[in-house]
Amino acid sequence: MTPPRTHPGPLLGRDVEQRQVAELLAAARDGRGAALLITGDAGIGKTALLEAATAARAGFRVLRVHGYEAESTMPFAAVHRLMIALRGHVGSLPPRQQRALRVATGAEDGPPPDRFLVGLGVLGLLAAAGAAAPVVCAVDDAHLLDAESVDALALVARRLEAEPVVVAFAARDEPGLAGRLDGVPVLRLSGLPAEAAARLLASALGGPIDPVAAARIAAATGGNPLALVDLATDLSVRELTETSVFDEPVPVGRRLEAFYLRQVRRAPSDLQRWLLLAAVDSTGNLALVRAAAARLGLAGVAGDEPDLAGLVEIEPALRFRHPLMRSATYAGAAGPDRRRTHQALSAAADGSGLVEIAAWHAAKAVIGVDAGVADRLEAVANRAGQRGGFRSRASLLTQAAGLTPPGPVKDGRLVMAAEAALAAGAAGLAEQLMGEVTDAALDPAARGRLITVRVNHAFFTADPAVLRSPAEMLAAADAFHGRDPAAEQHALIKAFGHTVTVDRLGSSVPLAELGRRMTAGAALDDGVAATILRALGAYVLRPYREAVPAMRAALGSIDRLGPAELLRFGPVGVAVAAALWDETAMRRCLERTEAAARDLGSVYLLDAILWLRSLAALRTETPRVAQRHADQARALRRAMGYETASSLNVALLAWSGHPRRQVEAIIDRARETGFGAVFASGDGGLAVQDLAAGQYGAAYARLKPLVDEPFLQATPLDYPDFVEAAARAGHLAEAEACTAGLEAIAAAAGSAWARGAAHRCRALVSSDDHAEAHYTAAIAAYAPTFLAIDLGRANLLYGEWLRRMRRRRDAREPLRRALEIFDDGDAPAFAQRARNELEAGGEPPGAPAPPGHGLTPQELAVARLAATGSTNAEVGAALFISANTVDYHLRKVFQKLAITSRRQLAHHFGDPARGATHDRGR
């Protein structure tokens, strides 16, 4: 934490900006959190605005965090300083947030925490501090913060809602920083208006100045307050009134730096060297600077001088009056002097146990390659990775590679840097680093890792190269062969996962070859990966009924996994469960993997699992449940500062009745980029809408290409829709063939989902004498499950059949049940079809059901978790919001539901395991 900088007198010409900041503070006093990013050129008044606004607010607790260049590759350095100031509140956080903060700041060892989980811990600390008094967290020179602290504080800024907290960043205009703070409102400071600039100039001069000259000087400096004050100090009134000096705009930064450098060079030589030492340090650590000064023979030079030529303040921390003063001092020194000073600071930091700072200065002290310093940087990078600082790790390894002689070690460090960059979401940096690698110089294991990074990068950036990902992962497995069995097995599992993603668009690896490779890979090592590979190989190569036991064994192994391993194997377990038509195992695997991701703070995987849950819910539950998961995924992506468009469930858009052109455009984009599974699911969603509207020919035409080109578990899951379309469109032979295939699957898998689908399809292709038994058998199979929409569709088909058999009275019950399910599950197209059937049968169908209880997605998520008995802190930890925000949402939930207790909330939502059909609007 750092004290405020001083600024001369009240701010001039910033009334509008001060009111804007004051409004945020007033809202915080009323319990509404907010954030602001103040940007602008050096000297424009960002820090002064922060300090003037906060100084005028009595009753606020002001926390100040400052960015330092020397700490820019020390992960969570700024968070650490903030945590020290708030250490009294750490005990109020949920245990996993406490652990994440302690590991991130180096207080204890443990699994590397997700930087967003660290951010949630910081949010909790600020919210807890706000219980005593409103809090302002002023983050100055944010462009110099370490990357992990930026991401953590950005999450805080985006999640402020019902906390008496304001987070205000001040930073120079840097596109990279603005992108990472995306979603935070921006206040860009420009130069002072002419009148205010003239008044400031006159005040700095201490005497009158010709108004015309003042206006021209203000225009030439762009109204930059620092330029006006310091140039007035540098020049006399006479010089300033000679307006020809300012016929052209003044290059403010360069002019000021020259001005400050002249001040430095007026000082005695030893004091100049001491000022260079202060400039090279950048952290404000006076003890470190004095230790380095002793090594340079400068002990006692600075002593207790109050201001060091007006450029530097010593107490309570070492600080240049403005960053431009520091940069002028540093840039004006000769290269050997700078390097010698860096070396002294490195040695002093080593002596104080400041390993990271010592390595940073050591790197600045060398020219060319230096294997020893490179080794030190790699060691520091490893420490950064252990604390969850992947962006810092990438930066340090990049520096290390730059200091490493050409060869395998250098290229290996570039690969490690690319891995860390991609783990931090820095796709551009990862791509740049991969481009610098000389593949031929890599050892096989490093080559396998490089291939893996390239594949992951393609998926992260939606590059059409994803089409080659199955073949690439097999190449990675080859590289790991004989060297790292676990990595080889994981690469083979990833090859299968990528094959599922590219779906029918991929042709680089025949399924039979993939199956053989996975079967061989299972023999490499025992364990869960081997069991999964054995199951996948059997599924690809052997008849379905023979593969079922191996797949059930794989699901059993996944069921026994702990949270950390679930993050690795949970997603493939979903694919195995889908192949077995085991809706219960699929949901269990998804729920456990989601819980593990929340518990371990793995936000990226949580985002992926929520998206996968949305897809699965559309198959096995209801569009309403699918939308709930999609909403949570979008909220999480906004909190991370990412675009939400990439998390769209295109099949859900189709089900929800979005304009077909929009849906088709997204489908086409998915096909162009190689995401075949997205393309197929979108096509299937449009086909379902055609079915709901009775457009059977259109549905048949859309589904036939998917059925004619069978693909793993995806094709059988489309059989029920295809059979309905084909049977109603007059293609009975094709409908019969798919029905027989489903019956074989049901006999082997034995699941209610498969049995219900087989009976439903058999009813559609049977004669009227035999259809009813299959309709009722389908309904009986679905009834005890959470397969709500399937149950509704079976009831709808049965009711339609009964009406065609002129059994109108009998048709009413299944049609009413279907309508209730479709209304509850938010399937309006099918609900309208049920209403039409009821009306055709002589019964008024009634108006469409109201949209439920009117809860927002966030309120709904809070209510569902609170209904299970979770505390506010536990709910907040699960949803990446603060306990204050949970309480705020619960009060709104109680008001909307007209209830007054959590007991009533639990009764309203019932047992979550029963599924959405029993809980209207969920």
Image (cartoon, rainbow, N blue to C red):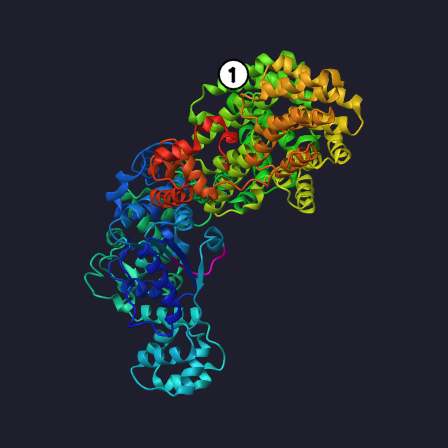
Q: Where in the figure is residue 675, as x and y percent of width and height? A: 64, 37
Query: Residue 174 magenta-drawn?
Result: yes
Question: Residue at coordinates 57% horizontally, 16% vertically from top-left?
Answer: 551
**In this view of the protein, can residue 383 be seen by the observer?**
no
Amino acid carrying label 1: it is Asp
Query: Residue 98 magenta-drawn?
Result: no
- Vertical position of residue 320 compared to residue 149: above or below: below
| The quarter of the displayed image where residue 128 is located | top left
| Mark 1 burial class by Cα count in 10 Å: few <14, some 14-19, many 20+ | some
Determine whether the residue tagged by mark 1 lies in a helix, strand or loop.
loop
- Vertical position of residue 918 compared to residue 381: above or below: above
Highlighted range, magenta: 169-175
Q: Where in the figure is residue 224, as x and y percent of width and height? A: 41, 72
Lateral position of residue 92 relative to residue 147, left or right: left
How many circles with numbers are drawn on the protein? 1
Q: Nearer the viewer, residue 521 or 396?
A: 521
| The quarter of the displayed image where residue 687 is located | top right
Q: Where in the figure is residue 714, as x and y percent of width and height? A: 65, 27
Question: Residue at coordinates 61% horizontally, 16% vertically from top-left?
Answer: 519
Q: Where in the figure is residue 130, as x and y percent of width and height? A: 28, 50
Question: Residue at coordinates 49% horizontally, 82% vertically from top-left?
Answer: 247
**In this view of the protein, can residue 759 be seen by the observer?**
yes
Q: Nearer the viewer, residue 741 or 142?
A: 741
| The quarter of the displayed image where residue 646 is located | top right
Lateral position of residue 113 relative to residue 819, left or right: left
Q: Which residue is mark 1?
A: 525
